[in-house]
Image (cartoon, helix red, strand yellow):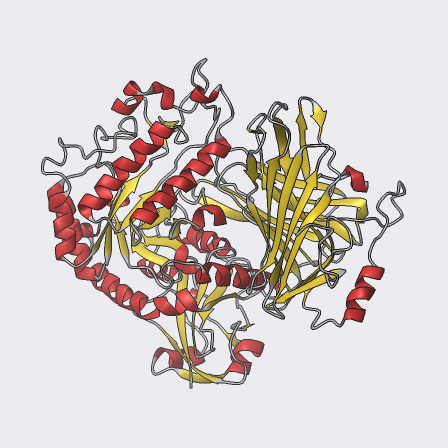
């Protein structure tokens, strides 16, 4: 509807509520302003909404930093906002200075179940129209997306977009910033800083989120923890270059203290809109919690679980990589398959090395045909052996990459992403394939689809091992290509999933380098890290599940000596670490002893018993003073059962942990608590634990939920690299 034809009962403000969150927007201006984003305000009467509007920052134009001013959903210099603007760009050198006018508004508010506000805006002077949609979902997440369209005449110069960001304001009690960094095999490492004046910005120019991705940017009350404090967080749901920021100016952000958000990081000249062309910004997803970081995770987990094609637990998998690497020998792999079936594996994934010319990582990428020299009868005998055991079959691909030593590179050098003046040095002996090139796209689709169809492939491990340095499209006039590359990836995944509705795809990017809600809308799990060392994995998984539920996090049992850290670890600790994720094996189990195989069988049975609990329960984490200990668990939605791990990563100054509360339990119920010993014995420091633990080792000990959850129980002092698994059932 046009502004002039808006209904007379269009409210001056709209209040969206869901799952303990309120979002209040002032609709009295063309571009709405945020009056509240945070704890649920209840069913506000009209008088309360009017009071919010009346007491909001109302000065649109004012030069004094001491006077509150407007902070809209599209902040810019027109509002005297001196921080990062929502939009920058130019048309033939003339800077964009939009004066948005509203052309339509549609409000949908469903009581306490969320709702949305969809706005049409335009700026005739800039020749630009905008669709702005703000949604509060049933799980309490706020999603914002922007769609720009050039409305200039056909003969006008192209509109060059420089940056598009989405920002929401945060109140002054948010004083501490949490985001993440990392490196290969050490992804998602938390880092905290105080919120100070200026801009805390994280920008990724890797062509993918990267192993050092900020991942999630959170602002919270001082010393917020897993279960305590208020937290406001933002995630950029995009698989290419991106930026995250939180910004505080002395004059604040309207009636708030700071602005939080992000968007796609555009390279120079990357998005130029001719008349009628559109730019769709990535969705920026916001979460608020009054119960610490676990509350943030609850919201993301609920949203992802509600949107899965096949929700629930994942099959138990064996991946061949760390078992055989490039040594693809049918007899050896057949023995591995037989052994995997004997311990309860449900899916076999044949990793790198099966395609033409691929005897090491110097050659072959791009030639997605089975290597007849290694597989003279093709993959059929191997796949038939897998199927004979009733197991699913998966295959590794790295479609977005190419080796110069490949038939594809020799036939189509123009398909390589890079400047025509000459390629930079390779990374991991490979370059990037321009999958936005229509012919390259069709080649990949046909090659993958042919193999999926022939072998009825159930699962693709989709890898992406190098950054997109000098991501220039040779056949598009040398234009920067990350944006189009990312959209082409999405289109390729979408097309494969449409043709093969039961096909599952794992996002792997040199481990956990592409973990975002953009790619997760098109894939079924992530390979959390190339590191199977359980010491590293405990922390990597803990922070990965801040965004993703555990059943989407691939976690495999590796050999005793880690292939990435060279550290030795006990089998019981390696097994316990995988229970709280999508479990698998990455190990040459043909070399295992009879005892190791027995423990793998017991672990497989336990995983199958508890995986639905892990895949549907709430993830909880205890706030502990000792950062070398972890207590985390999965609690059934009805509180009837819970599974916890008590883990020690390293030694600590303190000799005892004291009473440790088990978070998330129903304090009004009693629980029978027992230790699951199927994984093997654990090593206790000085050989002894609390007396009550002996009862938990037998038939279990019954304890009140209020004691377990509020007071806590003394837990044993484990030696480093050990974990106990506790199973609690309400009685």
When the figure is inspected, residue 74 is found, relative to residue 631, above or below; the finding is above
Residue at screen point 48% across, 46% down = 518
Nearer to me, 70 or 363? 70
Quarter of the image holding residue 305? bottom left
Q: Residue furthest top?
A: 421
The C terminus: image quadrant: bottom left
- Rendering coords of residue 92 (x, y %): 67, 22
Can residue 346 be seen here?
yes
- Rendering coords of residue 417 (x, y %): 42, 25
Q: Is residue 358 left or right of residue 479?
A: left
Count numbered badges in the picture. 0
Q: Is residue 219 left or right of residue 400?
A: right
Q: Is residue 13 left or right of residue 416?
A: right
Nearer to me, 412 or 583? 412
- Rendering coords of residue 511 (x, y %): 40, 43
Quarter of the image holding residue 232? bottom right
- Rendering coords of residue 195 (x, y %): 72, 48
Nearer to me, 32 or 232? 32
When the figure is inspected, residue 188 is found, relative to residue 467, above or below; the finding is below
Residue at screen point 80% across, 54% down = 255
Can residue 516 be seen here?
no
């Amino acid at each position: 509807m046009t502004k002039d034809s808006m209904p007379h009962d269009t409210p001056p403000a709209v209040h969206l509520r869901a799952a303990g969150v309120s979002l209040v927007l002032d609709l009295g201006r063309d571009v709405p302003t945020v009056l509240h984003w945070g704890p649920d305000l209840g069913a506000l009467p009209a008088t309360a909404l009017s009071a919010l509007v009346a007491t909001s920052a109302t000065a649109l134009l004012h030069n004094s930093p001491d006077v509150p001013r407007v902070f809209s959903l599209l902040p810019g210099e027109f509002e005297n906002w001196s921080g990062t603007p929502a939009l920058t760009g130019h048309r033939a050198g003339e800077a964009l200075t939009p004066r948005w006018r509203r052309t339509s508004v549609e409000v949908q508010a469903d009581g306490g179940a969320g709702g949305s506000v969809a706005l049409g805006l335009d700026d005739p002077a800039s020749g630009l129209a905008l669709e702005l949609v703000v949604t509060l979902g049933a799980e309490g997440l706020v999603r914002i997306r922007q769609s720009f369209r050039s409305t200039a005449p056909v003969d006008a110069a192209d509109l060059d977009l420089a940056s598009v960001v989405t920002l929401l304001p945060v109140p002054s009690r948010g004083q501490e910033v949490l985001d993440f960094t990392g490196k290969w095999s050490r992804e998602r490492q938390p880092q905290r800083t105080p919120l100070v004046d200026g801009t805390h910005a994280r920008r990724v120019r890797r062509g993918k989120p990267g192993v050092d991705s900020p991942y999630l940017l959170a602002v919270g009350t001082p010393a917020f923890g897993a279960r305590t404090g208020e937290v406001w967080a933002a995630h950029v749901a995009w698989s290419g270059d991106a930026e995250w920021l939180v910004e505080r100016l002395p004059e604040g952000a309207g009636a708030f203290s700071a602005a939080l958000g992000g968007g796609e990081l555009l390279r120079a000249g990357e998005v130029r809109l001719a008349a009628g062309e559109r730019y769709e910004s990535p969705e920026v997803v916001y979460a608020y919690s009054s119960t610490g970081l676990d509350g943030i995770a609850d919201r993301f987990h609920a949203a992802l679980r509600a949107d899965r094609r096949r929700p629930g637990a994942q099959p138990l998998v064996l991946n061949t990589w760390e078992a055989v690497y490039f040594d693809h020998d049918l007899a050896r792999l057949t023995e591995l398959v037989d052994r995997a079936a004997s311990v309860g594996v449900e899916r076999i994934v044949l990793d790198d090395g099966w395609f033409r010319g691929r005897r090491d990582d110097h050659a072959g990428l791009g030639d997605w045909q089975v290597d007849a020299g290694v597989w003279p009868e093709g993959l059929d005998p191997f796949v038939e052996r897998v199927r004979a055991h009733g197991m699913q079959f998966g295959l590794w691909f790295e479609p977005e990459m190419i080796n110069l030593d490949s038939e594809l590179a020799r036939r189509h050098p123009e398909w390589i992403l890079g400047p025509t003046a000459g390629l930079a040095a390779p990374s991991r002996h490979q370059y990037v394939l321009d999958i936005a090139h229509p012919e390259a796209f069709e080649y990949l689709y046909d090659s993958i689809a042919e193999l999926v169809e022939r072998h009825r492939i159930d699962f693709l491990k989709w890898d992406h091992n190098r950054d997109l340095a000098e991501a220039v499209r040779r056949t598009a006039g040398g234009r920067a290509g990350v944006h189009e590359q990312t959209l082409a990836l999405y289109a390729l995944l979408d097309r494969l999933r449409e043709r093969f509705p039961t096909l599952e795809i794992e996002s792997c990017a040199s481990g956990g380098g592409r973990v975002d809600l953009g790619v997760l809308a098109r894939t079924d799990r992530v390979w959390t890290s190339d590191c199977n060392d359980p010491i590293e994995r405990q922390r990597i998984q803990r922070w990965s599940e801040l965004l993703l539920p555990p059943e989407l996090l691939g976690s495999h049992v590796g050999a005793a000596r880690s292939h990435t850290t060279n550290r030795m670890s006990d089998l019981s600790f390696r097994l316990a670490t995988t229970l709280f994720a999508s479990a698998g094996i990455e190990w040459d189990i043909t070399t295992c002893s009879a005892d190791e195989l027995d423990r793998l069988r017991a672990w497989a049975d336990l995983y199958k018993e508890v995986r639905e609990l892990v895949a549907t329960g709430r993830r909880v984490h205890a706030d502990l003073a000792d950062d070398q200990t972890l207590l985390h668990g999965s609690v059934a939605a009805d509180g009837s059962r819970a599974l916890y791990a008590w883990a020690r990563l390293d030694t600590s100054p303190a000799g005892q942990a004291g009473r440790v509360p088990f978070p998330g339990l129903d304090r009004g119920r009693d629980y029978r608590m027992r230790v699951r010993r199927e994984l093997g014995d654990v090593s206790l420091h000085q050989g002894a634990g609390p007396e009550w633990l002996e009862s938990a080792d037998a038939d279990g000990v019954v304890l009140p939920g209020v004691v377990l959850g509020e007071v806590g129980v003394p837990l044993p002092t484990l030696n480093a690299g050990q974990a106990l698994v506790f199973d609690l059932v309400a009685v």
